[in-house]
Image (cartoon, grey):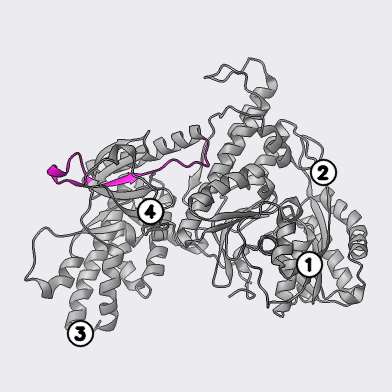
Amino acid sequence: MPIAIGLEGSANKLGVGIIQHDNPASNPPSPHDSAFSGDEQQQKQSSPPVRILANLRHTFHAPPGAGFLPKDVAAHHRRWVVRLTKQAMKQAKLGIKDIDCICYTKGPGMGAPLASVAIAARMLSQLWNLPLIGVNHCVGHIEMGRAITGADNPVVLYVSGGNTQVIAYSAQRYRIFGEALDIAIGNCLDRFARVLRIPNDPAPGYNIEQLAKKGKHLLDLPYAVKGMDVSFSGILARVEEMGVKLDQGTEPWLDSESQEPITAADLCFTLQETVFAMLVEITERAMAHVGAKQVLIVGGVGCNIRLQEMMGIMASERGGSVYATDERFCIDNGIMIAQAGLMAWQMGFRTAMKDSTTTQRFRTDEVLINWRD
Amino acid sequence: MPSTIVTSEKPANLARRPVRTNSLILPPPAFRNSIPAPTLQYQGAEALVYRTFFLHPSLNIHCALKHRPSKPYRHPVLDAKLTRHRILAEARVLAKLRRAGISVPAVYALDWEAGWLCEEWIEGETVRAVLDRSLAGWLDAADNDEGERVNGSLERLMRRIGTLVGQVHENGVVHGDLTTSNVMLRASTQTSQDADKSAALNELDGEAVLIDFGLASQSVQDEDRAVDLYVLERAFGSTHPKTESLFGEVLKAYGQSYKGAKVALKKLEEVRMRGRKKIMIG
């Protein structure tokens, strides 16, 4: 029953997680119908071989109207990583001897935060004399989502602040079928939030989601789907213009049909409806292409209930189902790194000290997924 | 590990096969009472393709009815806007190419509010199906007379495809989804009961017609043209392995088909090098 500790710090969240595999490789999680954040009960029912012993996260929040800078985030991670690791070990009631490997995020992500967490991982590895496992952040998300929801072989929509990808498994690789050609979906939402000075705590996307619930007027935004790829930069530019127009408020801005004033909520609503429709569309195309019925949504934007709902409608139209998790597993965390790292560790993968670097560029399809057939 | 660049096959490579067997799918309202009922041919992520009669069965004009059903997950305003935009874009491209005398289906009718487009039915088989059959023989018997003969007609077919794509590009259109499933070979009108022995020859000699302009756009940029060719090359390689030499004929004919073709081919080398995918950042 191997146990791994995972350290994640590719963006503004520092995560430390400890995971245990009960029956390594012998008992794959069985698929079940739906996983709208009721994963805890379902985990008990289907008893997947994964046990989460600790899952701690500390987030660096930039002030409203600003984004997080790599140097500030790196300082944040350095300040918290020891404290968080100690706390995780305490919560898991484990000693050094119980741990089998140290997993850390090799990339992709922001350079300075990645490097500061990798230093912590190397230190632990030498201090505790345990092997290091460098993990691809995207693969971490996918493996965690699969383990939590029990989705067997889904098409994966990975949506976060830095990534937008539609992924399907084939021949020991997670292949990217479609992706954002410029900025990521989360980046688009975050930057829009800055224009309206929507708070960054707990997350700009979360606050946009709450505001959007009050919106009702759909304004005209560009819609950029190219085959299975999407583009968000033009949409962001347009919606930012709208935000500035609303902010200045020099002249009244009324909806052309109802003559009601346009509000910040309407802008959030419009943005969400447009970009999520694009994401669901490319996911549907990928599903039709590979003949899959399951969709798994991972990444920070994947917590968005409206996105899950739209995806659910699409999946049920196709006779399939959507699998999603809540913020504990969607948003960057340490256990996902531990989970993917432990799977690699069981296949004999080790990262030597001299190779324990980090990289800002690390494509999902570069990783050999030899733990799946 | 080197960042090996992997390009997925394009969607509609497989989109021309039924993906769900939901008996509740109905053709657009205007066609629900047609007798005989429209028959569903293909079902992709976006559109359903039916075969039916244009206006009235007695006219005996077969047509392909492409229906883009509304997507319930989308906001109705956005849904209507997209459906209208896509149906009109497809029709405009087809009309433009048709005017230029390029073999694409003719547009008969459309209704963007109901989400359908009615176009000429192309009788015949896809190049993919024809190639699957004749390539088996070609790879086995490339050095005898029969092999030579098939080889000749295969090369002619490849050249026709290359020229066709070149003509489309010359007219400011990129197809967006070039695969061998999206090129039809029009069945020859002559009844050839006694021509069984030259059947293989005949079936390769039909007129090549480019179909499914659902992802097409109007562009004269070499980058877009090169990506178009690259997609075809990848689709060709994945559906018909060991046929690189044949694909060379496509490019050769393409290069001679219009003035800017050489530049697009040059660009293709660049696109090949980087793949369609970018290196991921962050």
In the picture, the quarter occupied by the N terminus of chain B is bottom right
Res. A349 visible in picture: no
Q: Is B177 placed left or right of A35 in the picture?
A: left
3D distance between C-alphas at marks 2 and 3: 74 Å
Q: Is residue B71 above or below residue A368?
A: above
Residue picked out by circle 3 = B144
Q: Which residue is mark 1?
A: A51
Tell me which amino acid carries mark 4: Gln
Query: Is the C-beta separation of discs 2 and 4 under 8 Å?
Result: no
Q: Residue B27's x, y, as percent? A: 33, 44
Q: Is residue B206 left or right of residue A149?
A: left
How many C-alpha atoms fall within 10 Å of the one at disc 3: few (<14), some, or many (≥20)? few
Q: Residue at x 20, y 56 (%)?
A: B123
C-alpha separation, residue under disc 1 versus residue under disc 4:
42 Å
Q: Nearer the viewer, mark 1 or mark 4?
A: 1
Check the residue under mark 4 and report the chain it is in.
B
Classify 10 Å Cα crowding around label 2: few (below 14), some (14-19), many (20 and above): many
Magenta-drawn segment = B53-75
Residue farthest toward the top in the current orientation of the protein: A251
Which residue sits at x=63%, y=42%? A306
x then y, percent, for residue A303: 69, 48
Which residue, given by chain and number where applicable, does mark 4 sit on?
B43
Query: What's the CA distance linking mark 3 and mark 1?
Result: 65 Å
